[in-house]
Amino acid sequence: MQKYLIKLFKRPTLEVVKLYWRIFRPETFGVKIILTHSNSILLVKHTYGYNYTFPGGGIKKDEDKLEGVKREVKEELGIQLSAIHYVGHLVSTRFYKKDNIFIYTSELFERSFTVDALEIESANWFGKNSLPKLSLTTQDIYDLYLKVV
């Protein structure tokens, strides 16, 4: 039932959030992580979004960025991260807000994960050369990753 309600209200909720951003122009802080295994990358599709993206989300006030990325991956995918590497910082001003995104990467030893069905609609491994169409911001994150690795 919850998944049905999320799908039903996805579009109107996103429009209200975008209107809020347009009026108040907030500054947000979040983390994304590029999880790899061999030659594959794990992408997620959030229940509140439409495109595949990298796991991650907002960081809490006064939360360390590294702790935030660990928390997000644990919540969304049930994965306990160990070796995490900083990739860089990206600022996106799309959708009328200033979104500070701190980007990390980690190589996983196995491909298993368990999604939080309320937050993640789907999660899949994709070959690095066969990624689905990414949003502009997600593509910017991936491009920064490619420059660093």
Image (cartoon, rainbow, N blue to C red):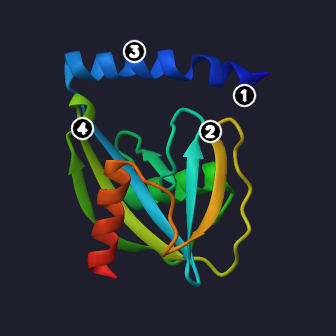
**Which residue is located at x 44 percent, y 23 percent?**
14
Helix, strand or loop at label 4? It is: helix
Q: Which residue is mark 4?
A: 94
Q: Earlier in the sequence, mark 1 or mark 4?
A: 1
Q: Amino acid at mark 1?
A: Lys
SS of the residue at dot 2? loop
Task: For the residues labelled 4 and 2, say whether their Cβ atoms are less than 8 Å apart.
Answer: no
Question: Which residue bears the numbered disc 3?
Answer: 16
Q: Crowdedness of circle 2 by 10 Å Cα count: few (<14), some, many (20+)?
A: some
Q: Badge 1 local density, few (<14 within 10 Å), some, or many (20+)?
A: few
> Is residue 124 among what the camera can see?
yes
Q: Which residue is mark 1?
A: 3
Q: Secondary structure at mark 1?
A: helix
Q: CA distance from mark 3 to mark 2?
A: 19 Å
- Reading the chain from its start, which is encountered first: label 4 or label 3? 3
What is the number of the mark on residue 119?
2
Label 1 or label 2, whichever comes before in sequence order: 1
